[in-house]
Image (cartoon, rainbow, N blue to C red):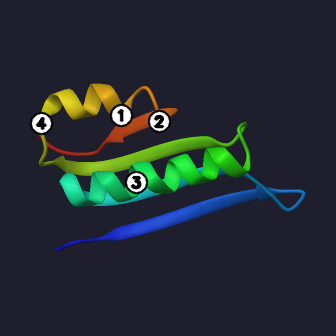
Amino acid sequence: MKVMESYIFLFNSEPVIRVEVKVEVDALRLKNVFMNFTLAKMLNPDVKTILVYVNWNVLEILKYIMLKYVDRLYWFGSG
């Protein structure tokens, strides 16, 4: 099952929070999340970015690199 959702919360017609929800994060989805967050920050540098995921299927080092560009990273999984 591949669930991908994207939410944008607005205040005075400006995006303030961007949330990406993924069941599985692989290299392609991570690239898309990175691009979406980069574009959101270009439009509004104050926007907060959040990635929520269940399974991380790429190298762990990419998680630490992603933390430099994502405001919050949440994992909902077992183990």
Placement of the C terminus among the 4 image quadrants: top left
Q: Do the residues labelled 2 and 1 touch (CB within 8 Å)?
A: yes
* Residue annotated with mark 1: 66
The tag earlier along the polypeptide, 4 or 1, is 4
At x 35%, y 68%, the residue is 4
Secondary element at tag 1: helix
Amino acid carrying mark 3 in the image: Val
Q: In this view, does 1 lie above or below 31?
A: below
Placement of the N terminus among the 4 image quadrants: bottom left
Q: Visible in this render: residue 33? A: yes
Q: Which mark is residue 59?
A: 4
Q: Do the residues labelled 3 and 2 touch (CB within 8 Å)?
A: yes
Closer to the camera, 23 or 66?
66
Q: Visible in this render: residue 25? A: no
* Residue annotated with mark 2: 70
The tag earlier along the polypeptide, 3 or 2, is 3
Dot 4 surroundings within 10 Å: few (below 14), some, or many (20 or more)? few
At x 63%, y 61%, the residue is 8
| Percent of width and height locating residue 42 | 66, 46
Q: In this view, does 67 lie to the left or right of 62?
A: right
At x 52%, y 49%, the residue is 37
Q: Pick out the residue farthest to the right.
A: 12
Residue at mark 4 to residue at mark 3: CA–CA distance: 16 Å
The tag earlier along the polypeptide, 1 or 3, is 3
Residue at mark 3 to residue at mark 2: CA–CA distance: 9 Å
